[in-house]
Amino acid sequence: MSQDDRQRKESERLQLALDAAELVPWENDLLAGGLRIFAELGYSEEEAAALLGEPLSLVHPDDVGEMTAALSRHLSGVSAHYRCEFRLRDHSGAWVWYANHGKIVEGDGAAPARRLVGVAFNIDERKQVEARLHEQQRLLAESEARHRELLRNLHTGIVAHAPDSSILYSNPRASTLLGVSEAQMRGMVARDGAWCFVDEESRRMEVGDYPAVRVIRTHQPVEGLVVGVRQGVDKDIVWLLVNAFPVFDNDGNIKQVIVNFDDISARKLAEEKIHHLAFYDPLTGLPNRRLLMDRLQAALAASARTHQFGAVLFLDLDNFKAINDVLGHAAGDMLLVEVAARIGACLREVDMVARIGGDEFVVLIGDIAVDPEEASQRTAHIAEKIRFAVAMPYWLKSSEQRTSPSIGISLFSGHRSEADTVLRQADMAMYRAKDAGRNTMRFFSAAMQQAVESRAALEADLRSAVSGRQLCLYYQIQVDAAQRIVGAEALVRWLHPRKGLVAPGRFIPIAEESALILEIGGWVLETACAQLARWQEDPALRQLTLAVNVSARQFRQADFVDMLRAMLERHRFEVSRLKLELTESMVLSDVTDVVVKMKALRGLGLVLSMDDFGTGYSSLAYLKKLPLDQLKIDQSFVCDVTSDAADAGMVKTILDLARNFSLEAIAEGVETEGQLAFLKKHGCGVYQGFLFGRPVPLDVFEALTRATFRGV
C-alpha cells in the first residue's frame, strides 16, 4: 500500500472516530465545521451556506467576548490550549451549548508553519445537567440556611452527637438550658462527667444513663425522660423533658444521635404544688387523709410480715369551735399549727401524724410490740404523752387559751385488718372518749362492735332495696353563670320501709365495699337513661343534662361499655345529655386501661367529668392523656374558698388547668353568694349547691325547671 493510501486510510479512521465522538474538527476558522454544526442546529444546507459567511451571528452576544478573549489568551501564550464554551442559536431560536477545544500546532512543510486546529462538540446536555445541579445546590443551601435559622431560634434545645458521643451541633437554646456556652459545647462529649444531670428524685444520674449515652449503648430511642440539670451550686435545677433517637447509616450503624429537650421547670413546679396540695395539709404541712391511708396500708402490710402490732390514734380537739368563734379563724389556725407541732414532738421519726379535718388529727404508730397486751400499754403511754402535751395552755391573741384532745385508739395487725376499718374503729373510739367527758382516751372495744353489726344489718336490708323498689333518684340542679338551670346531678336515695329515708353517707359506703354497688349503679344508669328519653319529648326539659356518678367497681366491669351501649339503644335521646362522673382515684388506678375505656365511652357520645377534682393527684401528663370534657371542683375546696388562702389557690389552679386543657369547670357545694362571686370571677361557668337548691324528688325538680322555662 502506498504512502498516500495509508494516509487516506488513517484519515478515514480518524474521521470515523471523530464522528463516533460527535466531534467536529476545524482548522484556523473557529466555526470551520459549521455545515455539520448548522445541520445539528436544524438549519437547511442553503441556510447553512448563507451562515458560513457570518458564523458569529449565531453566537450568543454574551459569549462573543469570552470566545475572543480565550483565543487571545492562547495566541499570546498565556494558556497552553484554547478552550471556550458558548451558545449557538438553533433554527427554533433556542440557545444550544457548544464547546471549542483547540491548539496552535507547528507546520510539517506541506501546511502553514503555525496553524490553530481543534474540535467543536455539543455540550448542551451537560450544561442542562449542570444547571439543574446548580439549582438543586442553591435550593439545598437555602433549605439548609432556613433549617439552621429555625434550629437557632427554636424554643427547644437540640444537640447532635457523633457515635463517640462528641457534640457535632447544638443550638443556642441548648446552651441556655444546659448552662454551657456554645463554644464550650463544641468541645464536649455526652459521656463527660462534668455534666450534672439528676433524675426526678434529684439523685445524680450515672453517666451510662444519660440520654445520648443510653441511645448509643442500646440503639433504642429514649422518649419522655425527665432530667434535671444543675447549672451551679446555688442555682435551681432546670427540669427538661428529653427525647433522644438514633440516626443510622445504610449499614445499620449509628451515624448520629439527635437529642431534643424542652424546659418543663414551670410545669414541674406546678405538679409539685398540686402534689403537695393533694397529699399535705396546707395549714400545718402535715400529711392529709390520702397520704395517711397510703401509709396506713403500707403499715398493715409490714405488720403482716413482722407480726408486730401497730396503732392508729384518732384525735379531736375539745372546745376548738368555741376558740375559733371567739378569737377568729386566724387564732384557730395558729392553735392548729401549735397542736400539730406538739403532737409531732411526742413521736418517733418513723411515726406519722396527719391532719384529716378541721380539728381532727390521726397518729400512725408502727412496730410497737408482738404481744397485744404490751402493745396496748405502750400505745396508752404514747397517747397519754400526747394528751398531756396538747392540753397545756396556748397563748393566743394576748390571752391564755386551753384545749384538750379526745383520743380514740385502734390496734391493728396486718393479717386481719383493713385500713378503712382500722380508721373507723379509732374514730368510733374517739367518740367514746368524747362521751366519757373529753380530754381522755379510749380503745376500740367489743361494745363498739355493735355498731359494726348494725352496719352489717343495714347491708342485708340494702340487698333487697333494688328489687323491692326502695331506691329512687333525687335531682340537684346545676346552673350556669346566669343562674339558668342547665341540668342536674342524679343522686340515689333509699326509702327504707321501716327506717324511712336513709342518708347516702350510711348506705353508699356499704354498697361500695360490696358487689351491691354494681346492681345499684346499673339501676341508676338505666333510670337516668329512661328519664333523659322522657325529657327529650318535653320542650321545657329536653335541653337538660344529667350527671351520674360511676363507682370504681362499676367502671372496672369488663362489659361496662357494652352495658351502656345497650341502655342507649333501649332509650333514645341525645347522648351528649348524659354525663358520667368519674373520680380521680378511679381514673389513675390503671391509666392505660382507663383511657381505652374512656375513649370508647366518648365514642358513644357521652360526656365525661372528673368528680371531686383536686382531692387526689392528677399529674399533668395523665390529665393530658385523659379524654375528659369537664373538671368538677370538690366541695371541700369551695367551702372555705373565701376565707382560706390555700383553698382559694387550689380552686384558681384547677380553673387554670381547666382553661389550659379546654375543659369545662363545674363547682359543687356552692352555698353562699361569696363563693359564687369568687368562682365567677375566676372563670368557673357551672355551679351546683344548696345556694341554688337541695336534691329534690323528680316531680319537684321538673316543676321548678318548667316554671323557670316559662319565666314564672
Image (cartoon, rainbow, N blue to C red):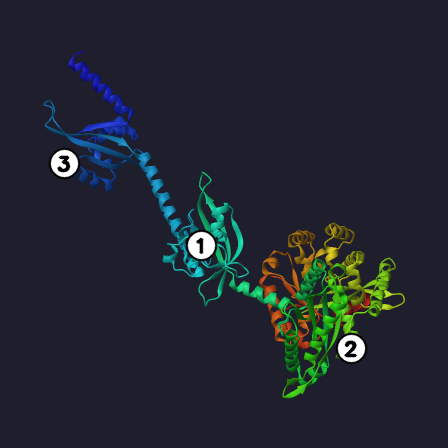
- Is any atom of residue 623 visible in this view? yes
Of 451 and 662, nearer the camera is 451
Q: Amino acid at mark 1?
A: Ile
Labels 1 & 2 near each other (Cβ < 8 A): no
Residue receiving disc 3 = 75
Instruction: Please report the residue visible at 23 percent of the width from the left and 33 percent of the height from the top.
Output: 100
For mark 1, give the secondary structure. strand
Residue receiving disc 1 = 158
Q: Amino acid at mark 2?
A: Lys
**Which sits earlier in the primary sequence, circle 3 or circle 1?**
3
Cα separation, mark 1 vs mark 2, equals 65 Å
Of 216 and 256, nearer the camera is 216
**Which sits earlier in the primary sequence, circle 3 or circle 2?**
3
Residue receiving disc 2 = 434
For mark 2, give the secondary structure. helix
Q: Position of residue 231 (x, y in %)?
A: 44, 63
Task: From the image, state whether disc 1 or disc 2 is nearer to you.
Answer: 2
Q: Considering only vertical position in the picture, is 144 above or below 446? A: above
Q: Amino acid at mark 3?
A: Leu
Check disc 1: other Cα within 10 Å, few if <14, some if 14-19, many if 20+. Answer: many
Q: Quadrant of the N terminus?
A: top left
